[in-house]
Image: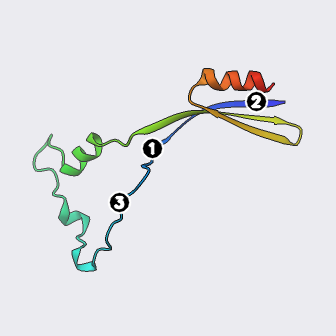
């Protein structure tokens, strides 16, 4: 019997997304002209500041994979303790 336990972290998804309207080719501006570069030493461009300030929420799960012969099972839970209880109960 093989048992593997891993922590998995994924981006949290929204239940519903807003639809985007298709943009026209004239409305699209190149990235170089849309975002100015840093003006002096030590200053960051707006893109660099926005990239570090906005982080997507994440969801952490713990996954256990159990193999016994040709049978395979996957158990998932919100914490390591919960998944280990599942594995213990499964075994």
Spatial CA span between label 3 and label 2:
41 Å
Residue that protrudes farthest toward the front in the picture: 16
Q: Which residue is denoted by mark 1 in the rendering? A: 12
Q: Residue 76: x, y in percent?
A: 64, 35
3 or 2: tag closer to the N-terminus = 2
User: Which mark is nearer the camera, 3 or 1?
Assistant: 3
| Quarter of the figure with residue 75 | top right
- Label 3 sits on a secondary structure element that is loop
Q: Is residue 14 left or right of residue 76?
A: left
Residue that protrudes farthest toward the left in the picture: 40
Q: Residues within 10 Å of mark 1 (few under 14, many from 20)?
A: few
| Quarter of the figure with residue 23 | bottom left
- As drawn, the label of residue 57 is none
Q: Residues within 10 Å of mark 2 (few under 14, many from 20)?
A: few
Q: Which residue is denoted by mark 2 in the rendering? A: 3
Residue that protrudes farthest toward the right in the picture: 69
* Residue shown at the point (29%, 43%) measured from the top left: 54
Q: Which residue is denoted by mark 3 in the rendering? A: 18
Q: Nearer the viewer, residue 77 or 23?
A: 77
User: Which mark is nearer the camera, 2 or 1?
Assistant: 1
Q: Is residue 80 left or right of residue 74?
A: left
* Residue shown at the point (34%, 41%) measured from the top left: 55
Q: Nearer the viewer, residue 47 or 84?
A: 84
* Residue shown at the point (23%, 79%) measured from the top left: 26
3 or 1: tag closer to the N-terminus = 1
2 or 1: tag closer to the N-terminus = 2
Spatial CA span between label 2 and label 1:
27 Å
Q: Is residue 16 shown above or below 31?
A: above
Q: Nearer the viewer, residue 28 or 19?
A: 19
Q: Is residue 54 shown above or below 80?
A: below
């Amino acid at each position: 019997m093989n048992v593997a336990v891993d922590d998995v972290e994924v981006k949290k998804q929204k239940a519903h997304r807003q639809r985007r309207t298709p943009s026209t080719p004239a409305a699209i501006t190149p990235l170089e002209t849309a975002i100015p570069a840093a003006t002096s030493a030590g200053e960051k461009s707006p893109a660099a500041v926005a990239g570090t300030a906005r982080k997507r929420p994440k969801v952490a799960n713990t996954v256990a994979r159990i193999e016994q012969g040709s049978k395979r099972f996957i158990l998932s839970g919100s914490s390591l303790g919960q998944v280990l209880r599942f594995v213990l109960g499964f075994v």
